[in-house]
Image (tube, rainbow, N blue to C red):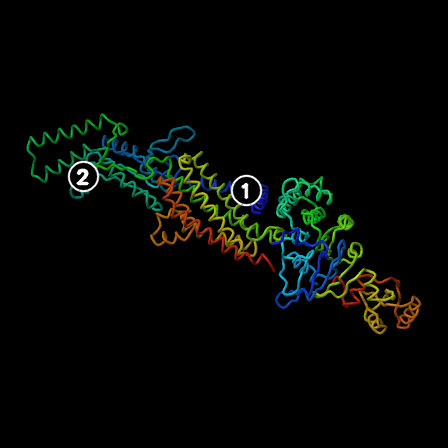
Amino acid sequence: MISPIVRTATVSLRRDRGALALSFILPVVFFTIFAVIFGGRRDTTPKVTVLVVDEDHTGASQRLLQGLKQEGSLVVKTRPNPVKGAEQPEYTAATAEIAVREGSAPVAMIIPHGFGENPVAFGPPDANRAKIQLLEDSSDAIAPQIIIGMLQKVAMTSMPDLMAEQGSKYLDQLAGGLTRDQRNRIDQAIGYLREREESSTAASRPDSEGIIAVTARAVVGENKNNPMVSFYAAAIGVMFLLFTASGSAGALLDEAESGTLDRVLSSHVNMTSLMLGKLAFNSLLAFSQLLLMFLWGWAVFRLDFWTHVPGFIVMGICTAVAVAAFGMLLASICRTRAQLGALSTLVILVMSSIGGSMFPRFLMPAAMQKAGLLTINAWAIDGFTKIFWRDEPLFHLWPQVLVLVGIAVVLFTIARRVARRWEFA
Amino acid sequence: MSSPASAVRVSSPPLRIEGLFKRFGPVTAVDGVTLELRSGECLGLLGPNGAGKSTLIRSIVGRVIPDAGSILVFGAPADSMAARQSLGWVPQELALYPRLTCRENLQAFGRYHGLGGEALGLAVERCLGWSTLADRSGELVKNLSGGMRRRLNLAAGLIHAPRLMLMDEPTVGVDPQSRNHIFEMIEKLRDEGMSIIYTTHYMEEAERLCDRIAIIDYGKIIAQGTHAELVQSAFGSRSEVHARFAGADERIAAWVAERGGRAVDGTAQFTVEHPTEIAALLESSAKAGLQLVDVSLRRPNLESVFLQLTGRELRD
């Protein structure tokens, strides 16, 4: 008696375009938005735009400017964008300040006259030394800090010879004079650095290590085309699954109101068969939604779907059954569709926020992370992350499978008990 | 455990209800109903809204658990699978799937009753033919007219070929033309020997369709019999005189009360043994200073019977 219920529900859904869109199009749209914002296939990390005014026009200022331009996290602009194809004049201190005031960029950097005479200094502050000036928009607290940090870095990586020269002068002063031999060797070393800087570009300098050598190696997700996409496919997917499941389970309320439920229950179908049929249909619907999300992730965001099919099937089924049972419980508790809409929105948004559907749980405080474990979202996302991000073997999914199936059994059992009110008067 | 077929005894009456009680909180919806439906008979349950007709029907189909009493369908308890298979229920509501077509609805309810394959196909065609919806079989229910939906609602109750049909006000909200169409469907069914319980608060429907009528009020069967038997028991050989007068209602009401009649919707109603009594009534009204507009003599109907038995109108 379960298959006729599934069949009827399937045909009804196929004819309900609104519900179909909510089930299959909206989740994909949301997933795409989140994936593009947080983990799109291109490097979409927001860059800081800085306007640079070079009033010095010396080799040192040019090298600093060049170094800044080669930083991937910065967009360095020395002149406004062309207007009707006509190139605009370079920024001056005044026009750069206006541009920051107008919101064209959060920071402007002025390299003053005389910067090149003494670009790098060690020792006590010198009031006569020409200082780089930053004009900042205080509404953006992060951009100026990034620029200051990048400036120190670029000074070291793009002007190592000047750093060394300045350092040797400082040493000369403190040591009370270097010997001729020492001076020659230092000059040789500085000459080598200058020569290397002049003969190479940043692009051909693969080991531009800086002062402290650092190498970074990703140990998780290193071979992933796009690890965050798998996270958002699961995170957004589960949230929408919950919404769809509660909406779909609401068909019970419609049927109760229209008298169809009474008619069905007066046939060979009993309440348990009816609810199992609804659970089966809602689980199938949820699984189809997840499948669509991950296939979309594969097609558009190059998610490694096909190498993780067994894991997807295991987690997909467990997640789908759990959310379907959750929807059945909500529908059986509520008296009307309006009640169901209000309650499901509230509960699902809370579950999704603490369960990691909106914001990764690993970025949350420890207490919040623990609270998240009370949600279906957290267990489902953890399971999908194990498969798609950490490449863990199938048997590692046992905690997630156990919890999700347990949730499904408990919620469905409660829903069945609550649904007794529909059984007889 | 006996099979459904063996549990249903053909010799037993299609429906036997004894001492049925059902209370909802302080309200007694069904109050000691005892009723028997004969084979091939159409029994009308006539009563105003809230009289307990639907509760009685829902008790028969197992949707309401009675507090006391017994219900046997062809000798089998009403909550047994055998009884369910023998019963066809047409609820008062349009209990259909709006996004399914006529055919899909019938298929769905057929499957719920355990039909499949060729048997299901034949049953669907039979029901589409009976409800004259064959040409609209592919139409979504939500796009059908009210009358068509009512016909499909009836057909869905017949999909598993039951031997006893329970029709709970199947013409509610239907225009006169569609109602007539539904009457023809039910008459056809009755002619084929189907046993039917038909609830209504329209006495014309009960008079036209039902072999016997049970009048129900406040959950009790207050009278049952054929139309003629009910009228005979309530009025004997007396006839009804309806007289309309112009002028103040208070004076008319006072005069009607004095003469032992009833004032209903501004009409004075009396029962008389002989038509000659009309002259005396009219003379009396003239003396009371009432101005007669028109007067008629007629045989009492079920509405009059209900009024006589309860003191209230059927549509109160």
Q: Position of residue B29 (x, y in %)?
A: 67, 64
A127 or A172: nearer the viewer: A172
Quadrant placement of the C terminus of chain A: bottom right
Residue placed furthest toward the top: A199
- Quick check: A103 above or below A368? above
B76 or B93: nearer the viewer: B76
Q: Are marks 2 and 1 in contact (CB under 8 Å)?
A: no
Q: Residue at x 16, y 28 (%)?
A: A191
Task: Tell me the residue that label 1 is attached to.
Answer: A20
Task: Tell me the residue that label 2 is attached to.
Answer: A121
Q: Residue at x 6, y 30 (%)?
A: A181
Q: Position of residue A350 (x, y in %)?
A: 44, 52
Look at the numbered disc 1 and give the secondary structure of its residue. helix
A229 or B214: nearer the viewer: B214
Residue placed furthest toward the bottom: B258
Mark closest to the chain's N terminus, 2 or 1: 1
Look at the numbered disc 2 and give the secondary structure of its residue. loop
Q: Position of residue A179 (x, y in %)?
A: 6, 33
Q: Residue at x 19, y 26 (%)?
A: A195
Q: Is residue A151 left or right of residue A291?
A: left
**Which amino acid type is shown beneath numbered disc 2?**
Ala
Q: Position of residue A362 (x, y in %)?
A: 35, 47
Q: Is residue A63 left or right of residue B283?
A: left
- Residue B42 falls in which quadrant of the image? bottom right
